[in-house]
Amino acid sequence: PVGAWSMADGQDVHEAADASGIFVLAETAHGGIAPVTFELLGKAAELSAKSGQHVEAILAGYGVAPLADELIAYGAGRVHLLESEALSSYIEENHATAVADVVRSLRPAILLVGATVKGRGLSARLASMLHTGLTADCTDLDIDTETGLLRQIRPAFGGNLMATIVTPDHRPQMASVHPGVMKAPARDGSRSGETVRHDISTMRQDERISLLGETVKAVCGNNLADSRIVVGIGRGVKSHETVDAISTWAESVGAAVAGSRAAVECGLVDASRQVGQTGQTISPDLYIAVGISGQIQHTAAITGAKKIIAVNPDRNAPIFSMADYGWVATAEEALPVLTNIRF
Ligand code: FAD
């Protein structure tokens, strides 16, 4: 039965020999499946081709059954459906309890979760409940074909090196993965798969927590993840007037505005638009970095950009070493030219 939070000593860590399958924990968003889930299914298929492990998905929520076919169309051979009214609102503790219970019974070798706002909290809580490890915020994954060990690749030491982490002793090997770094496979509605409904009717809600209400935050400007052109604002763009002028122009040409962490901390750009190690990863056709120095924690998240233009008055700024075109100028000097560009 699905129980409440349990901290029994290490009993959840199953032996490597028992464990099999690459499982993706599906995330729902706006009545559909969040794009990061499809990206994880794409990576799972790649790991499966190397290791022979089967790909399965776990889908938890209320009224989510119709979404199972989407997961199959994107590569899940089997979908484990956990449906309960208790999961109708997203309360992390309840979702974690339901998912942990099914993971204990299915014994996956690998469990992948999107490193989204929801996924970051849920994966950490799940790892704790399952007494296993978690490699958070991975930017790549691979598999050792001989040992079946997941190679979990992520920035370490403040982003100064890329670490490859393996977890030989614990199962499932759990990793959360940045959205936008992996490629989603093409949807194929003719794929066949099976949906297995798990009975969670005995599930108890965590009585310490109840959802009083939800407020949807209005989002201004074009969507960062989908835009072909992104303008990144850094601390060098010192005034709100310059940010407003860049944002108005960006909106008019269908570009999205992003920011460095320093720009977010200065209040120039909203935190939801931060790009970098602790923000979003983007792969636009064109990234225009204005007043951004080019520290690794920022640039690691823009390596997928097809072309990069950098505007910075310091000709030695590190951003120029990765930019396709460099413009040695202040934001104020560049503004009249920039805001006249049409694509
Ligand atoms: P700065 O480094 O201060 O650069 C400002 C630039 O503006 C300079 O190059 C300067 O020459 C230029 N400039 C000066 N005057 C002007 C002008 N008038 N017009 C135009 N340009 C001008 N950073 C991120 O961005 N994203 C992250 O997710 C992130 N995560 C981090 C995680 C960790 C664990 C750590 C330790 C750091 C992280 N950082 C992150 C911070 C990162 O190390 C840098 O501090 C940050 O990216 C710097 O932002 P910036 O380039 O806007 O500011």
Image (cartoon, helix red, strand yellow):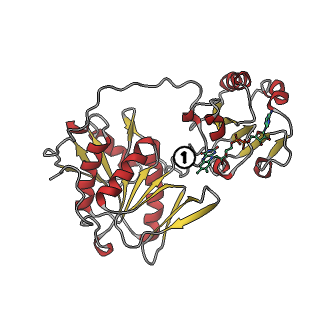
Quarter of the rendering occupied by the C terminus:
top right
Q: In the displayed structure, would residue 326 be above or below residue 220? A: below
Nearer the observer, 73 or 246:
246
Answer left or right for 237 relative to 63: right
Quarter of image, res 193: bottom left
Q: How many marks?
A: 1
Looking at this view, name the residue that lies furthest to the bottom.
146
Where is residue 144 shown, x and y percent of the image? 48, 73
Quarter of image, res 150: bottom left
Q: Which residue is pictured at 48% across the width and 57% down the height?
A: 43
Q: Residues within 10 Å of mark 1 (few under 14, many from 20)?
A: many
Nearer the observer, 341 or 202:
202
Q: Is mark 1 within 8 Å of ligand 1?
A: no
Where is residue 185 shown, x and y percent of the image? 49, 51
- Label 1 secondary element: loop
Q: Which residue is pictured at 27% across the width and 58% down the height?
A: 103
Q: In the displayed structure, would residue 27 be above or below residue 196? A: above
Q: In the displayed structure, would residue 132 be above or below residue 293? A: below
Nearer the observer, 224 or 10:
10
Taking the image in four quarters, ligand 1 sits in the one at: top right
Answer left or right for 63 relative to 240: left
* Residue 97 seen: yes
Answer left or right for 52 relative to 140: left
Where is residue 173 shown, x and y percent of the image? 39, 64
Q: Which residue does the numbered mark 1 point to in the structure image?
A: 180
- Amino acid identity at mark 1: Gly
Q: Which residue is pictured at 53% across the width and 51% down the height?
A: 183
Q: Which residue is pictured at 27% across the width and 66% down the height?
A: 10
Answer left or right for 158 relative to 306: left
* Residue 25 seen: no
Where is residue 243 shown, x and y percent of the image? 70, 26
